[in-house]
Amino acid sequence: MSNTIIETVNPRHNNKQGLGATRFQKGLALLLISGVLLIAILLLSGLAKMDLSVFSRMTLAVKIHAGSAIMALVLGAAQFALPKGRTLHIIMGSLWVAAMISVAVSSLFIKQIFAGSFSPIHLFVPLTAWGLYAGLKPLFGGKKGEHGKQMRGVYFGALFFAGLFAFLPSRTMWNLFLGG
């Protein structure tokens, strides 16, 4: 019944037109879920020790930034596996964009690397803003393929790649999840 409602609102949104997840997207989602499970197993087995005292020492900006980034990482991974164009995709995509905006804005208040000034990682802020704009603009022109391409670029560039910097030894996320 819900498919009928969605197709009535927009008849182009159905799996017959190839809007479902590709094998690559399902594989990537599986890889990300496997990574999360591996971290959970390492933490539960005691091989990695999460240091929660690090969390208490984080500034509010860092807490917002990290929480938004984790939310965006999970929502983005789910987006890869879910059918495209459906109501759930639109809702989760909207939440993902909001989380990415929160990640970018909160990072402007984090200036601990260069003692009170911006660092090279802050270059991801305008790149993220431009990427989100470039990913949303095609939707208004009906270019869904371009939308997907741009949003994958933001996910991997601004979230995944930049996020790797957060897990360098002695950085806050390293200390939090691996016990410094």
Image: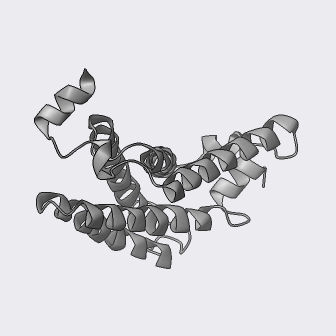
The quadrant where residue 45 appears: top right
Coordinates of residue 39 in the picture (x, y in percent): 73, 45
Residue pictured at 25% horizontal, 24% vertical: 2
Residue in the foreground of this view, choosing between 30 and 133: 30
Type of colouring: one colour
36 with respect to 44 (left or right): left
Question: Can residue 131 be seen in this snapshot?
Answer: yes
Query: In what quadrant of the picture does the N terminus appear?
Result: top left
Residue pictured at 70% horizontal, 57% vertical: 174
Coordinates of residue 43 in the picture (x, y in percent): 79, 40
Counting the numbered discs, the total is 0
Residue pictured at 56% horizontal, 55% vertical: 28
123 with respect to 169 (left or right): left
Q: Residue furthest bottom?
A: 120
Residue pictured at 20% horizontal, 27% vertical: 4
Coordinates of residue 78 in the picture (x, y in percent): 47, 44
Residue 144 drawn above or below residue 9: below
Q: Residue furthest front?
A: 16
Residue 6 drawn above or below residue 163: above
Residue in the foreground of this view, choosing between 143 and 14: 14
Coordinates of residue 23 in the picture (x, y in percent): 52, 55
26 with respect to 99 (left or right): right
Question: Can residue 112 be seen in this snapshot?
Answer: no
Residue 66 drawn above or below residue 154: above
Query: In what quadrant of the picture does the C terminus appear?
Result: bottom right
Q: Residue furthest top?
A: 1
